[in-house]
Image: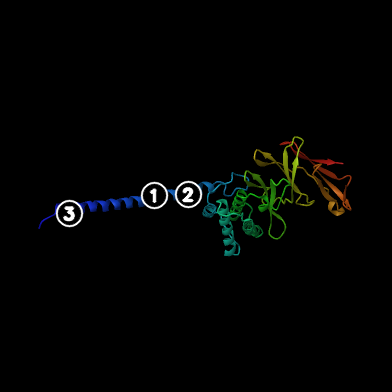
Amino acid sequence: MSINIEDMEKTNIRLLIVVAMCMALISCKQSKNVAEQQEGAETETESEVVFREGIYALPGDYEVDHPKNLVMYFDSLCREGAFIATHSDDEKDSIAVWDAIKLLDFYAQGKEKFYPARQIREAQEILRLEQAYSFNHGGQYGKNGGEAFMFRLIEQAALHCNQIDYITDFCADDRKAGILYFEEWGLGNPLYSFLVYRVGQGFRVKMIGDVGEAKIEKIFRLTDEQGREYYLCSNNNNGVYFCQFLYGWKGEQLELIRELDVQFGCPESYEKGYELVFNPNQRTWSYCTKDGDLYHRVEGTPMLRLILDGDDSKFVVEQK
């Protein structure tokens, strides 16, 4: 049997080519797997960084996260202990919340043209309702997963919003700051009041007072003699909810300068039908009686005055 050396060489060359091609394919596949693993590791690392710090913090108490993928971010929050829980195990509510997050993510990435204002507010209301239910059935204020999830959603919704009306119930006349308010379960009691203010192209959120403490019904933009701007977050109710919080700009941030820290009131005001009236020009609160469209101050009752002086701003009770 004769062996053709030339044929053998051709065969060997073909085998070498096949082997080389196989090795190249294996190498490409391995590189792809490594790249995918690295990408997954980077994504997971990013998730861990953005959600671990401040997961249970009150809005405004820490630097807001800037996740690239909001769905992944909120999923990571769930894995860390923040979660969507419904007292009736309503799957429909959970789906509505996640749909709102997906739409917000599409909008943040430029894949959706319109901000999902309605869906975001419905999702917030679902989460608010669960917290109110919990607190009225023995739950404690403070760190819990549903509240943390809600706070982070409010922050991200504000961060990616470009119009203050979408994320507040009412706002100041300059439209740079406004109030987002959630009441407690069916009682009209305060649950959460948030100050929302513009920073760059979006908005930041800051809790006013504490959970279940402050019911804010109005916001006033005030200026002092030096042209410094302030926002007075106010409830003028003469009863239990009367409260005043004064905020001022510190660079791009609004910081609490002073809250009402003096004793003020007129015990007989309710019995005699006095109304407590705020005059934003004089920055005073006075007990008045009403005659037609005119208010007349009741002599002998105390008056509260706000003195604007930067960090030294204060509330003063005056007797007249």
Q: Position of residue 177 (x, y in %)?
A: 69, 46
The amino acid beneath tag 1 is Val
* In the foreground, 121 or 107: 107
Report helix, strand or loop for mark 3: helix
Q: Are marks 2 and 3 in contact (CB under 8 Å)?
A: no
Q: Residue at horizontal 75%, vertical 42%? A: 222
Cα–Cα span, label 2 and label 3 = 54 Å
Q: Position of residue 200 (x, y in %)?
A: 62, 43
How packed is label 3: few (under 14 Cα within 10 Å), some, or many (20 or more)?
few
* In the foreground, 68 or 191: 68
* In the foreground, 86 or 94: 94
* In the foreground, 36 or 41: 36
- Quadrant (top left/top right/bottom left/bottom right) for the C terminus: top right
Residue matched to label 1? 34
What is the tally of numbered marks visible in this picture?
3
Q: Residue at horizontal 85%, vertical 41%? A: 319
- In primary-sequence order, the first of circles 3 and 1 is 3
| Residue reaching furthest to the left | 1
Residue matched to label 2? 43
Report helix, strand or loop for mark 2: helix
Residue matched to label 3? 7
